[in-house]
Image (cartoon, rainbow, N blue to C red):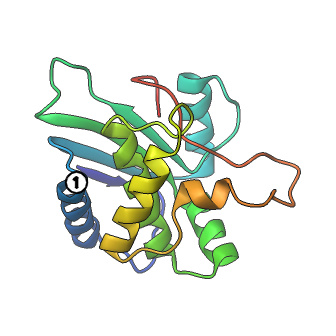
Amino acid sequence: MIQIDKKLDGLSEPQLRRFLAKARKAIPLYGDVSLLLTSNRQMQQLNRSFRGKNKPTDVLSFPSVDAVAGKFAGDLAISVDIAAANARKLGHNLEDEVRILILHGLLHLAGCDHETDTGQMARKESRLRNQLGLPSNLIARTEQAPVKKKTKPRSSAGTRRAR
């Protein structure tokens, strides 16, 4: 299921479904994925509720509970506001940015965690990004040179709370 709460110019639900299927197969990740494309306001509410962080973030992953794993992989929520800003800043289109965030979130649903591993998720994301024809991977760009802003780079987190 794909729910679009925020207008996403140039990206249709059928395109998102095709990309989700292709990325899940490439990972591999089994089970359905629910995708919410929404605003910073709702992402801040989700991030506060599930991670205790009172700020918006780009992508949140909510892995399924073990009882339904295999049939349902989990939920993803993506801030279209942050995706649009990142796309402008990084010089690619919104469609590619949303796909990068989907891939990153799917890797979290598959059990990867760049906050605790020693680079395995970054390497896998980079390989898959190349395979799927996407620009720079999310982990690599947040771990590069310090960001000039006063805020820290956003990342995904946790288990069923959110990744």
Circle count: 1
Relative side of 52 to 145, left or right: left
Q: Looking at this view, is 153 or 74 the one in front?
A: 153
Q: Residue furthest front?
A: 118
Relative side of 31 to 50, left or right: left
Q: What secondary structure is found at the residue carrying circle 1? A: helix
Q: Could you tell me if residue 5 is visible in this image?
A: no
Residue at image location 31% in from the left, 72% down from the top: 132
Tell me where residue 47 sits by quadrant. Answer: top right
Q: Could you tell me if residue 14 is visible in this image?
A: yes
Residue at image location 57% in from the left, 35% down from the top: 115
Identify whether 115 is placed above or below 29: above
Question: Residue 124's x, y, as percent?
Answer: 39, 54
Q: Residue furthest left?
A: 71
Question: Residue 95's x, y, as percent?
Answer: 43, 74
Residue where numbered disc 1 is placed: 24
Residue at image location 22% in from the left, 59% down from the top: 26
Q: Residues within 10 Å of mark 1 (few under 14, many from 20)?
A: many
Identify whether 84 is placed above or below 163: below
Relative side of 160 to 146, left or right: left
Residue at image location 26% in from the left, 21% down from the top: 65
Question: Residue 157's x, y, as percent?
Answer: 53, 33
Question: Residue 147's x, y, as percent?
Answer: 81, 58
Amino acid beneath label 1: Arg
Q: Looking at this view, is 125 or 156 the one in front?
A: 125
Q: Looking at this view, is 48 or 161 the one in front?
A: 161
Relative side of 110 to 52, left or right: left
